Image (tube, rainbow, N blue to C red):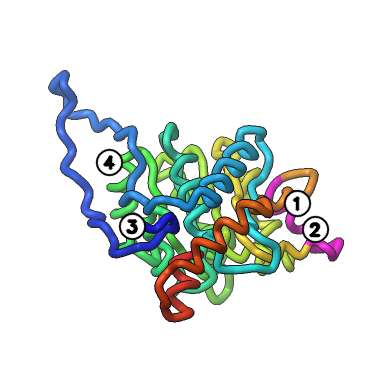
Amino acid sequence: ESPCPIVAGAASTRMPKRALPSDGSTKKKAKSKPAGPPLPNLHPSQRALVNKANAQREKELPVLITGKDKEPGLGKTYVAGAFLRECTENEIGMLVIYVAKNAELGKDQAFSVGANVSNTPFQLSRATSLKREMEAYGKACISVTRTTLNQLFHPHGKHKENPAQLPELAVSLGITSVLLCLDEIHELYKTDKLAKAVAAMRVELHTVKIEVVGMTATPEFTVKGIRENAKTLFGCEDLPEPLTYSEEEHASLLASLKQLPSAPTDWETKDLG
């Protein structure tokens, strides 16, 4: 078995039937395990990066997964997927929102991050199926487009007549925390639009904890305005420390990648993150 994570095929996303509680009541109880298919094994270097992300979160510091500066294709998606699932292990009422760069990548990466592949990209019109998943597991993960992200956090419509949808979703699903994972996050904090919207939502939904997890090989913190936007988006006073592979971890991962059979460029990009 290759030490690098390779998806051979998506596991079934059909949810198991719920059994009645042993006391005979009909009250639904959330399952302790996270929803979604199991992830492939991680390379030891990727596992080390997940551990760094967990340690960062335990210190209540923002998580920015970089892997290696300006070097894509080193498995950030798998690292993020493992990290997100571990974040939800002991949580009830958590909604993980994974935002891919585009709809095609969102579909390809849904399995990796633990989202329901058959319900990707998630649309707000499918909130009923999301509610069933929340009831079954007490948590859920969805993969959305940036358009849906905008609808969740911003008023929208031709004349902005439709309010941001996250507050209504939080009430209807009983959400107590949101883990917002943004791929290519540097593209989203180049302006202050999303940063201000997330900051405002933290105030409006003051009983719901909103965490932001970022993924990018190019943080681009050299411009002051971008740095301020990033701090606002992450909700922190200091810039997040990019989490990267050590030189030894990087060399080990590259050596393993070179042993993989040849494959199209798009396969390598999608499956290895």
Which type of secondary structure does the marked residue at label 3 adopt? loop
Query: Which of pointers 2 and 4 lies earlier in the amino acid sequence?
Result: 4
Q: Badge 1: how crowded within 10 Å, few (<14), some, or many (20+)?
A: some
Residue 168 visible in this rendered orientation of the protein = no
- Which residue in the structure is indicated by mark 2? 227
Look at the image and say whether residue 77 sits in the magenta stretch.
no
Name the residue type under label 2. Arg
Percent position of residue 234, x then y? 68, 50
Residue type pointed to by label 4: Ala
In this orientation, which residue lies closer to the viewer: 149 or 211?
A: 211
Q: Kindly report which numbered mark, 2 or 4, lies closer to the viewer in this rendering.
A: 2
Q: Classify residue 256 as left or right of residue 52.
A: left
Label 2 to label 4, Cα distance in Å? 40 Å
Magenta region: 221-235
Q: Main secondary structure of the magenta part?
A: helix
Which residue is depicted at the point 73% across and 67% down? Answer: 191
Say which amino acid is labelled 3: Asn
- Residue 142 lies left or right of residue 205; in this view the side is left
The residue at 42%/77% (across/down) is 262
